[in-house]
Image (cartoon, rainbow, N blue to C red):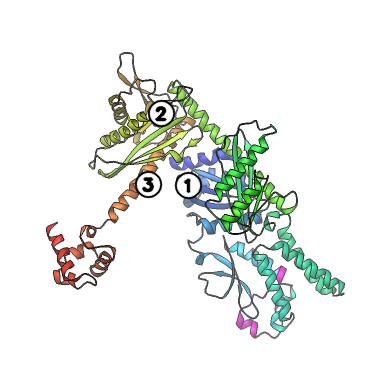
Amino acid sequence: MMNGNVADGIEVIKGRLANLPTTPGVYRMLNAKGDVLYVGKARNLKARLTSYTQPERMVVRIRKMVFETRELVVVEVPTEAEALLLEANLIKSLKPRYNIIFRDDSSYVSVLITDEETPMIKSHRGARRTKGDYFGPYPSASAVYQTLDLMERAFRLRTCVETVFKNRTRPCLKYDIKRCSAPCVGKIDHKAYAATVTQAKKFLRGERGEVLKDMQRAMEAASAALEFEQAGVIRDRIKALSHVSGGSALSHALAEADVFAIVREGGRLGIQAFYYRNGQHVGNQMYYPKFDMGTREDSGEAEDELAEALRVFLALHYTQRAAVGQVVCNLIPADVETLSEALSVSAGRKVKIEVPKSGDKRAVVDHAAKNAVNALHRKNAENDGWATQMASFGEMLKLPRSLELLECYDISNISGRFPVASCVVAGREGMLRQRYRRYHIKTKNTPDDYAMLREVLTRRVEKGMKELAFDDEGRPLGLPDVLLVDGGKGQLNVLVDVVRSLGLLGQPECPALVGIAKGEERDKGLETIFQAKVDAQGDVVLEELPVTFNSALIFVLQRIRDEAHRFAITFHRESRGKALAVSRLDGIPGVGPTKKKALLLHFGSVEGVRGASLEALSHVNGIGEELAQIIYDYFKTS
C-alpha cells in the first residue's frame, strides 16, 4: 500500500509533467520550507521526472525524498554536458541533503593540475593539501573521469606520479596512443609543455572560445611553417575540444555576467536570471515580480511597459548584491543610461547593460527567454489551478463576493510550554508568504489549546475590525474572506465565540468561519470541512461541507492546513530553543557573558556552579571573593 505522504509528493510532480520539456536540463526538488532536497540533471527532463511518479521502483532514500517534495524548479540547457556542469555548481553551492555526495568540499571529486616543474593532471578527493589548481567539484567520479579523458586527448598532460615520471627512460603506452606528450623523456620541451598547461587551465575555467582560437592560430602557423605533423597534432586537439563544446554557446559565451530575460503571459511577468562566473553557468533563478501591466500584450505600449518593469527589477535586484561588469538582457531596460550609471557607482566598477543582437551571447539570452516562457507558463497553470479552487470553495461557502484571501490558524506547544500560534494566508495565486504571521501566546502556559486559540483569534479579529474599511466593490478590508482553523467542531466553536463576542457574527463584513477536522486515524484525504452558519432563528449551526474525497479542492485545503501546522511547529522550535538557551546564571548581578563563560568552563554546567563551594567559586578566573559570595548566596536563596 502506498504511503499517503509519498503520494503527496507524487501529486506535486504529476501536476508539473504536462508542462515539462523533453530537452536536457537540471531540476531541483524543494520541500515545504523551500529548502533544496535534490539537484539532478537529465537528458530528457519530462522522462526523468516521470520516473519519480512510480514509487514501486524507488529505493527507500528516493521515496523519502519524494515524500518531502513540494516544489520543482526546472531549467533547460542546450546539451547534457552543460547540464552536468550546472548540476555540479548547484550541488556545490546548495549542498542538497539527498544528493549522493558528502557535505563539505573536501569530500567532492575535483580535477587537480599540480604545481610542479612539470605539472600533472589527476582526480582529487579529500582535503586540498597538495599545491596546485583545483577545478570542480564535480557531482560524481564518472564526471571527473570523463573530464580527464577529454583533457588527455586534447592537451596530453602527464598523469603518472612523480616517482615514475623521474625514472622513465622511454615513453609509456599513453604516448603511443596520443594521450600524453611524454615530457618525461623530452618529446616536448619545457616551454611548449607549460603553454599547454596554461591552455588546459583556461579550458577548465570555462575560457573555451579563447583556447580554441589560440589553437587555431597555432595550427595555421605550424602549417605555414610546413610543420605538418605538429599542425596535425593541434588539429586533433581542436577536434577533441570541438566535439564537447560544439553547439553549446552557453559554455563559452560569457566569462562573468548576469543574464536576464523578461517575458509576459496572461498579464503576469516572469524574469529568468542566469549567472555566469569563470565562463561557467553557476546557477539560475526565476522571479515573478508583481507589476501593474496596464496595456494589452499585443499593443504598441507593451514593450515599453516590459522595459520599465525590467528597469525597476534590476534596480531592486542589485540593492541586495553588487552588479557584475556585464549585465545581458533580452530587451533594453527603460532609462538604461541612468540605470547603468547607478549600478556602476554602487558596484564600484563599470557596469555595462547590453542586448546582444546575434552570436553566442544572443544564444544565451534566447535560452534564458525560453526558460522564462516555460517557467511562467507552468506558474500560470499552477496559479490558475489555485484560482479555480478558490472560486469553487467560495461558491461552496456561498460568499457574497469572490474569495480572495483565506487565513488559516494553528497552535503549537508542549504541554502548554512555549505556546505559539501561526497564521498562513492563501489567495488566488497560491500561498502568500509575505502575509504570514506568528504569535506568542501571552495569557496561557498550561495545556489549554482552546484558550490559546481564543487569544490569538481575538487579537487578530480585534485588529482587523480596527482597520475595517470597504473598497469600491464593498469588500471589507482588514479582514480576510475566510477564517479557517485547524481542528474540528471544538476549535470552530471557539472561533464562533470570538466573532460573537466582538459583535461581528452575522454581519455582512463577517468572514466565513470554517474548520478542517482530521479524518479517522488522522488519515489524510478523509478530512471533514465544517462551516459555521447563522440560521433564521439566529442560532449557529455547524454544517458539514460536501468536499469530495481526493478532489483538487481537498488537496488545496490540506496544503493550507499543513502549511499552518509547519509554520507553527517551526516557530515553536525557535521559541523553545531561545528559551532553553537562557541560563540561570543570567539572573546573577555582576555576572556577564565573560564571567558566565568562565564559570561554565570551570565547573562544566550550571548544576556544577550551583553545587560549588564558596572557596571553589572564588578561585575561578575573574570572579574573586566578593562576586563568589554573591553567586553562592544567589543559589542558596533562589
Please name the amino acid that badge 1 sits on.
Gly
Q: Please, what secondary structure does the residue beneath circle 2 have?
A: strand
Mark sitting earlier along the chain (2/1): 1
Residue pictured at 49% horizontal, 26% vertical: 391
To which residue does mark 2 refer?
482
- In percent of width and height, residue 523 lies at 38, 36
- Residue 265 vertical placement versus 146 (above, below): above
Q: Quadrant of residue 81?
A: bottom right
Q: CA distance from mark 1 to mark 3?
A: 13 Å
- Residue 411 vertical placement versus 317 (above, below): above
Near-viewer residue (557 or 350)? 350
Near-viewer residue (54 or 97)? 97
Q: Please, what secondary structure does the residue beneath circle 3 have?
A: helix
- In percent of width and height, residue 286 lies at 57, 45
Residue pictured at 56% horizontal, 70% vertical: 124
Which span of residues is magenta-colored? 153-174
User: Can residue 515 be seen in this snapshot?
Assistant: no
Residue pictured at 70% horizontal, 56% vertical: 253
Residue 177 appears left or right of 553: right
To which residue does mark 1 refer?
34
Mark sitting earlier along the chain (3/2): 2
User: Can residue 387 be seen in this snapshot?
Assistant: yes
Residue 155 appears left or right of 507: right
To which residue does mark 3 refer?
570
Q: Nearer the viewer, mark 2 or mark 1?
A: 2
